[in-house]
Image: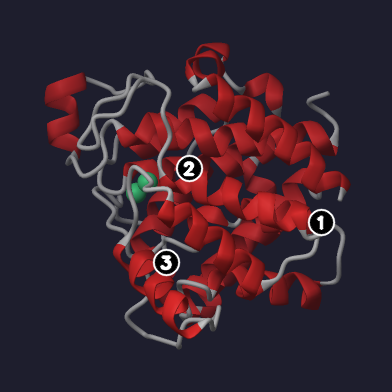
Amino acid sequence: MASTIAGRAQAAYLGLAIGDALGATVEFLTPNEIRHQHGIHREISGGGWLRLKSGQVTDDTTMSLALGRAILDNGGRVEALAAAQAFDAWMRAKPVDIGNTVRRNLVTFRHSGNPQAPPSEHDAGNGAAMRVLPIALATLGQPDEIVGVAVRAQAHVTHHNALSDAACDTLVAMIQAALEKVGASGTAQDLKHFATSLVARHPQFAFEGRRRENPSGYIVETIQAVFQAFFGTDHFEACLIDVVNRGGDADTTGAICGMLAGACYGLDAIPPRWSNALDASIRAVCLTQARALVAA
Ligand code: MG
Ligand code: MG
């Protein structure tokens, strides 16, 4: 199973939820505060500023699931209006957390009916990047142009920004290459050229050098922490422990590292104690949605 595309898609979805649940405990703490409170944070235990139950996930996972559901209900097609309506319904259900840019642009959508937010150089948060996984699965094997249109259709509902777009494109390309095992060794290093190419186009994302700790929700800092952890480790567990112990927007760096590492290393690499700790209904939806999106 782990070696099939569907298996790696499921691992990416579980990775997203596991990284979110693991990181949420230490979201907005500094690395020093984490060391003081947890030593090395390595267990899914709930708590954090959101006072989560153990295994509970946050917006990173639930927005992704809402988007994936909308794509499946739409026959596998990615459409901006369907995505915006799904996110709006998600917001009405009073999620445990919601980003400022997401809230502002969904409120605007409610009034305007236009599912595309206006371009803004300020909307360079990580809120679109954290939910790219359903797009990567739904457009697997399609031409780059179609993938790019789908990436923007979902991203621009809340984040219409060139840096966010560049990060979303890169993450989708990495996930798709990992699922298709482009680069036969099956390691993170197979995917490094996508990161290098992102930095060549947008030098702000340069990630080699100074350790990125306490990453904010700014997409550049988020991606720097994610790439340092992903390329600096060689298995799923080490990657997630590395990134969440950097603190800051740890549920989101955890979620993004989780989808990359899951796609790259497969189901067998996910520690059973983390899978088992995840909220059971979330785990079940992740597994069925991943399989359905790849098939759609
Ligand atoms: Mg969150
Ligand atoms: Mg977050």
Q: Nearer the viewer, mark 3 or mark 2?
A: 2
Q: CA distance from mark 3 to mark 2?
A: 21 Å
Residue position for label 3: 206
- Of 179 and 251, nearer the camera is 251
| Secondary element at image label 2 | helix
| Secondary element at image label 3 | loop
For badge 3, the amino acid type reads Ala
User: In which quadrant of the rendered view does residue 33 lie?
Assistant: top left
Q: Is residue 291 left or right of residue 124?
A: right
On the image, the x and y values in percent for residue 215 come to 29, 53
Residue position for label 2: 255
For the rendered model, the colour scheme is: secondary structure
Residue 241 in view here: yes
| Secondary element at image label 1 | loop
- Of 189 and 158, nearer the camera is 158
Residue position for label 1: 140
On the image, the x and y values in percent for residue 74 come to 78, 60
For badge 2, the amino acid type reads Ala
On the image, the x and y values in percent for residue 44 come to 39, 21
Query: Do the residues under discs 3 and 2 have CB atoms within 8 angstroms?
Result: no
Q: Is residue 288 above or below residue 111?
A: above
Residue drawn at x 64%, y 38% as measured from the top left: 12
User: In which quadrant of the rendered view does residue 203 lie?
Assistant: bottom left
Label 2 residue near ligand 1, CB within 8 Å = yes
Residue drawn at x 31%, y 24% as measured from the top left: 46
For badge 1, the amino acid type reads Leu
Sequence order check: which comes first, mark 1 or mark 3?
1
